[in-house]
Image (cartoon, helix red, strand yellow):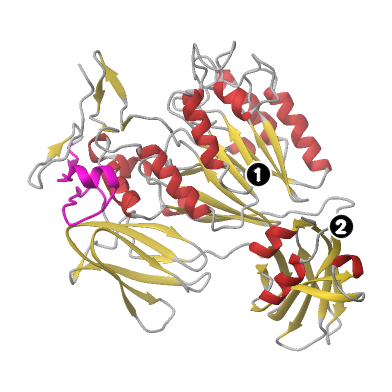
């Protein structure tokens, strides 16, 4: 007997779970199911209630569903005073996504969600609170932007199964790949497409890249993730366990494809990524590679201790990632299977800023008494509700974390569909409160000994020293510089008019008639106090100069900040190598 399928239903159909949750219904034609099109025939159940999904420092995003295809409208009002804006953002939608940009950091707003002239939520519950405060990013220099994904489940055929009865019957009824073809791949593909627009320093795939660890699925998941230009750190999830009969003598497809440096049979998949000069990310393996059971195998606690010591000696903050939670023994690693040993190590290292988990498919942020203020973050799944990925903006004095859903016709439909999993209880169980999806962690971080800072310090009229910091890459390819430019970070303690440029001294061997100093790219920006990331893109004439370079040249990134309140101009510079063709 095949697995029970959650097939499209009429709009009058109501399925009630054991908990009494009302599950909505859908009448979705085969064409829409195969293409992901959200057309007029789409009807989705009411399990996707109005919800405030994301708050950042300058934006908010809300989602909701309506039975009739209608408009997406939001009213938003600054609590401190100011006009109410009513924004009509979309027309003829069943699954509504309201994104409002241009908000002020640290400001409180009230909002109402409307469709067809009707208010869609009560604006008083945990999903739809009716008010929010935007985040205030940490003020220190930015160290990295990290993308975090987990539970991709590439190759999965049945979403929403808690367990199977004899004969393969899914409990609860699942949404299968016959009706929703290649759903896991399509969700990951949409997320990666959005992330490609960000300047990422690292991508973390924190376990369950695949459904069963099949070689083609492992290859496909890694190929998707490697579309992003940033370095990739992978951890093993329970679904990525060894698969008998595949991938060589140890049957370990993830080891052979993602960790080729590990010897055959070495199934403990761990790694360290050094990001810039101030951050290190340690990936651990929380799985028995043969069964997928949550265990910390081998000498990983001692190995983690040594890696954290090394990172601290280099003046680096640390982030630790592993698939299973350490603080939930039923869903995660039991105490006697290594959780206590790892927690003891983490308690000794105050430069560990956050521990990242997947596995539960939920958003959750917790602490653990013996490890003090250290936060443990469970990140929501991408392959089904809550259908998202996270961005970690890591600064020298804090981390801003925001949760995001990819938006296209397919992801709208699939998010609302999988909100009906587990008898419609999925959102309540997995959404997490807003403080677990969008938050800022602040801490006191110091530069390590000998860690250079490119500062230019001048005296203000009052005699107080002021500082401007510059962070940039050390080298960049000529083709990349011409095509995409390069991103630099500038930190100023005052509001300033900032100019950043790349300059090089070119000679006859570089295709110019006589030696001269050339600007290869420039950007100007009025910036508030704090850290800003600026992309330097060459103009057409600057690209022409770059196109004539056939060898590597030495250049430098220069920043000049003119305080808008008056005072001395601050300058800083950093060497840059432009690689030839």
Image quarter (top left, top right, bottom left or bottom right) of the C terminus: bottom right
Indicate left or right for 12 with 117 as reference. left
Q: Which contiguous range is marked in magenta? A: 20-48
Residue 321 sits in quarter: top right
Residue at 52% x, 69% y is 106
Residue nearer the viewer, 125 or 269: 269
Looking at the picture, how far across and down is residue 4, in whole percent? 20, 26
496 on left or right of 184: right
Judging from the image, what secondary structure is the residue with disc 1 in?
Answer: loop
Numbered tag placed on residue 393 in the rendering? none
Q: Residue at x 35, y 60 (%)?
A: 62
Name the residue: 70% across, 81% down: 496
- In the picture as drawn, the residue positioned furthest to the left comes out as 12
Above or below residue 378? Residue 300 is: above
- Relative side of 579 to 127, left or right: right
User: Is residue 339 in view?
Assistant: no
Task: Provide residue 381's location: percent of width, then percent of height.
Answer: 43, 40
Q: Which residue is mark 2?
A: 452
Look at the image and say whether residue 66 sits in the magenta stretch. no
Among numbered discs 2 and 1, the one appearing first in the sequence: 1
Q: Main secondary structure of the magenta part?
A: loop
Magenta span includes 27? yes
> Which numbered mark, 2 or 1, is in the foreground of this view?
1
Q: Is residue 196 visible?
A: yes
Image check: 547 left or right of 202? right
Mark 2: secondary structure: loop
Question: Which numbered circle lies on residue 231?
Answer: 1
């Amino acid at each position: 007997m095949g697995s029970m399928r959650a097939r499209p239903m009429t709009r009058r159909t109501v399925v009630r779970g054991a908990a009494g949750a009302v599950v909505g219904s859908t009448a979705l034609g085969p064409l829409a199911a195969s293409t992901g099109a959200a057309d007029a025939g789409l009807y989705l159940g009411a399990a996707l209630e109005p919800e405030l999904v994301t708050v950042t420092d300058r934006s908010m995003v809300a989602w909701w569903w309506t039975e009739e295809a209608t408009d997406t409208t939001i009213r938003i009002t600054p609590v401190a005073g100011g006009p109410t804006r009513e924004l009509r953002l979309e027309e003829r939608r069943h699954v509504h996504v309201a994104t409002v940009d241009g908000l002020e950091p640290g400001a409180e707003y009230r909002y109402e969600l409307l469709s067809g002239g009707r208010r869609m939520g009560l604006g008083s519950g945990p999903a739809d609170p009716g008010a929010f405060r935007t985040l205030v990013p940490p003020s220190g220099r930015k160290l990295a932007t990290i993308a975090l994904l987990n539970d991709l489940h590439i190759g999965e055929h049945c979403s929403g199964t808690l367990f199977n009865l004899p004969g393969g019957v899914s409990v609860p009824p699942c949404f299968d790949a016959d009706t929703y073809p290649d759903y896991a791949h399509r969700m990951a593909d949409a997320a990666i497409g959005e992330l490609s627009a960000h300047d990422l320093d690292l991508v973390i795939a924190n376990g369950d890249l695949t459904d069963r660890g099949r070689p083609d699925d492992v290859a496909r998941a890694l190929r998707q993730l490697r579309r992003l230009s940033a370095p990739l750190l992978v951890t093993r999830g329970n679904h990525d366990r060894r698969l008998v009969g595949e991938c060589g003598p140890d049957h370990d497809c993830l080891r052979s494809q993602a960790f080729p440096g590990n010897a055959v049979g070495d199934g403990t998949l761990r790694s360290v990524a050094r990001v810039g000069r101030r951050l290190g990310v340690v990936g651990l393996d929380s799985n028995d590679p043969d069964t997928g059971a949550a265990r910390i195998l081998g000498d990983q606690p001692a190995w983690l201790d040594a890696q954290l010591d090394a990172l601290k000696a280099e003046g680096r903050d640390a982030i630790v990632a592993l698939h299973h939670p350490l603080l939930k023994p039923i869903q995660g690693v039991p105490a006697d299977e290594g959780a206590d040993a790892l927690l003891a190590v983490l308690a000794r290292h105050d430069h560990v800023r956050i521990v990242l988990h997947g596995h539960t498919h939920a958003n959750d942020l917790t602490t653990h008494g013996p490890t003090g203020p250290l936060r443990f973050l469970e990140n929501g799944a991408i392959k089904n509700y809550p259908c998202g990925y996270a961005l970690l903006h890591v600064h020298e004095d804090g981390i801003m974390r925001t949760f995001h859903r990819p938006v296209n016709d397919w992801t709208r439909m699939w998010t609302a569909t999988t909100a009906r999993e587990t008898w419609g209880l999925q959102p309540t169980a997995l959404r997490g409160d807003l403080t677990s999806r969008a938050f800022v962690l602040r801490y006191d971080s110091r530069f390590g000994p000998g860690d250079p800072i490119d500062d230019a310090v001048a005296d203000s009229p009052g005699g107080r020293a002021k500082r401007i910091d510059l962070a940039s890459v050390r080298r960049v390819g000529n083709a990349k510089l011409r095509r995409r430019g390069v991103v630099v970070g500038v930190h100023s303690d005052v509001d300033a008019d900032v100019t950043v440029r790349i300059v090089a001294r070119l000679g006859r061997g570089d295709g110019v008639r006589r030696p001269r100093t050339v600007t290869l790219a420039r950007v100007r920006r009025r910036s508030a106090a704090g850290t800003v990331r600026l992309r330097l893109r060459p103009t057409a004439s600057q690209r022409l100069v770059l196109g004539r370079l056939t060898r590597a040249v030495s250049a430098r990134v220069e920043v000049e900040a003119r305080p808008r309140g008056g005072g001395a101009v601050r300058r800083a510079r950093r060497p840059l190598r432009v690689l030839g063709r």
